[in-house]
Amino acid sequence: MNQPARGDSVRTDAPASSSSAVPNTDGIWYASYPPGVPHEVDVTQYQSIVQFFDECIEQFRERVAYVSVGENMTYGELARKANAFAAYLQSLGVKPGERVAIMLPNTFQYPVALFGTLKAGAVVVNVNPLYTVRELAHQLKDSGAQTIIVFENFAKTVEDALPGTRVENVIVTGLGDLLGDGLNLKGRLLNFVLRHVKKMVPKYALPQAVTLLDALKAGYGRTLTPVTLHPEDIAFLQYTGGTTGVAKGAMLAHRNIIANLLQAKVWSADQLTGDVETVLTPLPLYHIYSLTLNALIFMGLGGRNILIANPRDTKRVMMIIRHEKFTGITAVNTLYNAFLDNEEFRKRDFSDLKLAMAGGMATQKAVADRFKAVTGKPIVEGYGLTECSPIVSMNPVDLSNMRDFEGSIGLPAPSTQVRFRKDDGTWANIGEAGELCVKGPQVMKGYWNRPEETAKVIDADGWLATGDIGVMDEHGYIKLIDRKKDMILVSGFNVYPNEIEDVLAMHPDVREVAAIGVPDPAQGERVKVFVVARNPTLTAEAVIQHCRKHLTGYKVPKLVEFRSELPQTNVGKILRRALRDEELRKLTQN
């Protein structure tokens, strides 16, 4: 049920419809499905996410939905605030289909703004709060958003990004605002400390802005006008591709998201029960991975989300969860690695843990093995991407029948077809590598206002080209080899960065690693690795020697560079592209 958004981008070369016969991979995965999992799901069960939300509220009203800064928010209170926010948006004149940008970290404010926006019939435009002015301005202009809600810590960025956008309505909030409606001492004290002691709120000038507390106060006094939503209406503009070019808005319809929710629900029905499931949520809810799994799928279970605003502050995270028992966790490889390096995490009692899910990037075997040794539970890896809402494939989550970790991203989800397109345009058969292509109800409608870009990734038969190279075995399990664009070509031989990174991750003195290709006049490209060492005495020669023991000669890195940290996306995915760009700049400057 994992790895949403392995690749935040898709290939840029246009896919051609395959002319080959139906491959012998089609449908072979069904024989490997866990008992009771259907081949198809009925995506017509809900008209919209709002209908799903209202049903969950009715069923779980008294349960705790979210935990933040030691405070609880019940499902009933979430609904009350979301309805008030929706009514306020309607009072501003926000019409169904209009875009509302949400620029918030993992706090109570995010689900309130999320479901309030959807209940008003508007489209959610999720925004990374750490965006630069340039990145934010592009997303606001491209989406045409007229309303934005932002954490006051990032209000200065909004101020600087507004010129040239259509934004008219700005709603600002502070971390303590929804801790007891901002009326309690804890909330006011927290805001004071962040503003005046820690100086974490840069000065800004947004004279048109209103506070979220004032917006909710106004909304409580108004009647929400119900909006009729249809399955094909857009629910999210989820921007993707920013690491490889201009960010594009993937149009995710209510139907797409509902399909993914139901696919995950039938897949995990035996593992996640009617008991109150508590999920640790360190990944940002504005990212498609955490949005679908944590905010929505666990809502369908009446789950309790422990919100982590800054997962990279491992010490703070450990303090937050010190007295918490959680049954589920979603994270990426780098985050699991950081947690495992923390002594307090290693000493925890994991007897309540049912499901540890990995996604966002390839999970390294060394990290998975370490996690199981510490917790006694495996990491369950899956695969997805923003354009698929995001889940494409999942490993079985029944721990009693779990296969040993072998790097598989699992089996195609119910109602999902998967094929692999070879370079000549024909479909690959079992054991043959090709570009993974997906067809199913979770596949996006296309890219916002970019029909040409849409045509490059979705062919005439509806197959979405993911840009990932993979292979399927005789049981229907998929294994990814690498991103198509990340492949390194050494003297005509294909070298996949994941393989090199997996080998180096086995070295006890390596904390993190990234492999890229750099231009070479003789070989075309050479392999260079960037290493964050766990042991400062680690040398480049030791790195190369380790690789020689496990890799064919042409795959062994020729260059080693040590770093204190590696560039990462907001969810912790290592940005090989950023490292490649650095190397190319060096070459042009020399």
Image (cartoon, rainbow, N blue to C red):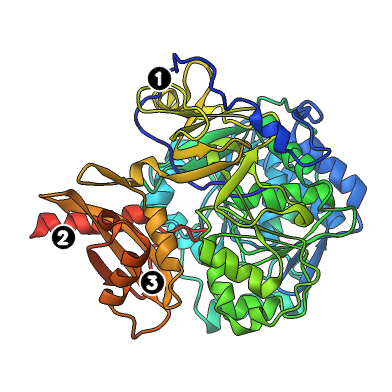
Closer to the camera, 116 or 476? 476
Residue 149: % across, % down: 59, 52
Within-10-Å neighbours for mark 3: few <14, some 14–19, many 20+: some
> Of the residues shown, which amino acid type is indicated by label 2?
Lys
Residue at (65% x, 79% y) in the render: 346
| Residue 322, horizontal then vertical, whole percent | 72, 80
Q: Does any portion of residue 291 appear in the rendered image?
A: yes
Q: How far apart are labels 2 and 1 at the CA level?
A: 36 Å
Please, is residue 75 above or below residue 462 in the view?
Answer: below
Query: Which quadrant would residue 191 be assigned to in this image?
Result: bottom right
* x 81%, y 68%: residue: 352
* Image vertical order of residue 135 relative to residue 434, above or below: below
First in sequence: mark 3 or mark 1? Answer: 1
Amino acid carrying mark 1 in the image: Ala
Nearer to us of marks 3 and 1 is 1
Q: Label 1 belongs to which residue? A: 16
Give the percent coordinates (x, y) of residue 570: 49, 58
Q: Name the disc covering residue 565, or none.
A: 3
Query: Farthest residue in the left direction?
Result: 590
Residue at figure coordinates x 42%, y 63% from the top left: 503
Q: Secondary structure at mark 2?
A: helix
State which tag comes first along the sequence, 2 or 1: 1
Residue 199 placement (x, y as % from top left): 49, 78
Sequence-first disc among 3 and 2: 3
Residue at image mark 2 = 586
Amino acid found under the numbered disc labelled 3: Glu
353 above or below 184?
above
